[in-house]
Image (cartoon, helix red, strand yellow):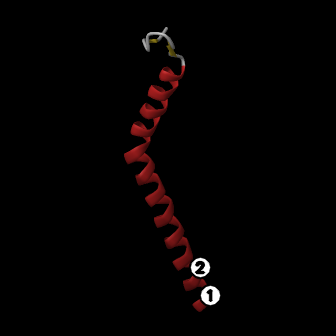
Amino acid sequence: MKEATGELNMTVITVIAIAAVGAFLFAFLPGILQSIRDNWDKSNCTTNPNTGVITCP
């Protein structure tokens, strides 16, 4: 019976860990994705070395 209890405890810990990772992703993933989109858009911009003007397509 002790062995079954230990397996149950590990299952509970695993479920809690997966839920914690899911909650983290749910909370922060939209902001992370938006940041990636913003930086991706900025990577297409060019700067004129003479005037310093930034031009984006």
Q: Residue furthest front?
A: 50
Name the quadrant containing residue 4: bottom right
List x then y, in percent, for residue 46.
52, 14
Tag 1 and tag 2, C-beta contact below 8 Å? yes
Label number found at residue 18 = none
Q: Is residue 43 visible?
A: yes
Look at the picture and state if 33 lies above or below 25.
above
Placement of the N terminus among the 4 image quadrants? bottom right
What amino acid is at disc 1?
Glu
Q: Residue at x 44, y 14 (%)?
A: 52
| Front residue of this view, candidates 53 and 38 | 53
Disc 1 and disc 2: Cα gap in Å? Answer: 6 Å
Q: Please give left or right for residue 46 compared with residue 53 in the image.
A: right
Q: Which residue is mark 1?
A: 3
29 on left or right of 6: left
* In the image, residue 29 above or below residue 42: below
Q: Position of residue 25 (x, y in %)?
A: 45, 48
Q: Amino acid at mark 2?
A: Glu
Q: Is residue 57 above or below residue 44?
A: above
Total marks shown come to 2
The image position of residue 37, as x and y in percent, is: 47, 27
Looking at the rendered structure, the secondary structure element under dot 1 is helix
Q: Residue at x 49, y 32 (%)?
A: 36
Local crowd size for mark 1, using a 10 Å CA cut-off: few (<14), some (14–19), many (≥20): few
Which residue does the numbered mark 2 point to in the structure image? 7
